[in-house]
Amino acid sequence: MNEGAFANMKTIAGLFHGCTSHKLGRELRAAGYRDDRGDPNRKAIGAGLAIIKRDPENLQWKENLWHVQKVSELLEDFGWKRVATDDTTE
């Protein structure tokens, strides 16, 4: 699995006007992709929407990462607008 395609919610939220990680989290929960603790649920993991990274040396540490493209498509479906990016270089 390409972890480069995954990011935290703050990073993904920054791609959309007015979106924050908290708002993104509410959208993911409303769509049925987060559990009561706010972690990705089996549906999200099974759909390739999220992964949970763990540190083998510190078993309590974990990081929830979300698939940037798939979550972005969900946000666009929910009506969120992407921040315009200027990919041209002069």
Image (tube, rainbow, N blue to C red):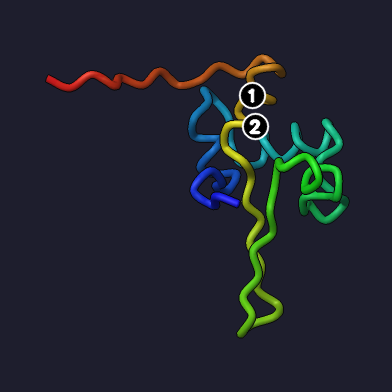
Quadrant occupied by the C terminus: top left
Disc sitting over residue 73 in the figure: 1
Residue 28 in the image, given as x and y percentages of width and height: 76, 36
CB atoms at circles 1 and 2 under 8 Å apart? Answer: yes
In this rendering, position of residue 88 left or right of residue 73: left
Residue at image position (45%, 21%) is 83
Distance between mark 1 and mark 2 Cα atoms: 5 Å
Label 2, residues with CA under 10 Å away: few <14, some 14-19, many ≥20: some
Element marked by disc 1: helix
In this rendering, position of residue 39 left or right of residue 65: right
Task: Name the one closer to the observer, 18 or 78.
Answer: 78
Residue at image position (63%, 18%) is 76
Residue 40 in the image, given as x and y percentages of width and height: 77, 50
Residue occupied by mark 2: 70
Residue 4 in the image, given as x and y percentages of width and height: 49, 48
Residue at image position (86%, 36%) is 32
Q: Amino acid at mark 1?
A: Glu
Label 1, residues with CA under 10 Å away: few <14, some 14-19, many ≥20: few
Q: Residue furthest bottom?
A: 57
Q: Residue furthest front?
A: 1
Residue at image position (81%, 38%) is 29
Q: Amino acid at mark 2?
A: Lys
Residue 84 in the image, given as x and y percentages of width and height: 40, 18
Q: In the picture shown, does residue 78 fall above or below 72?
A: above
Q: In the picture shown, does residue 61 fall above or below 87?
A: below
Q: Residue furthest left?
A: 90
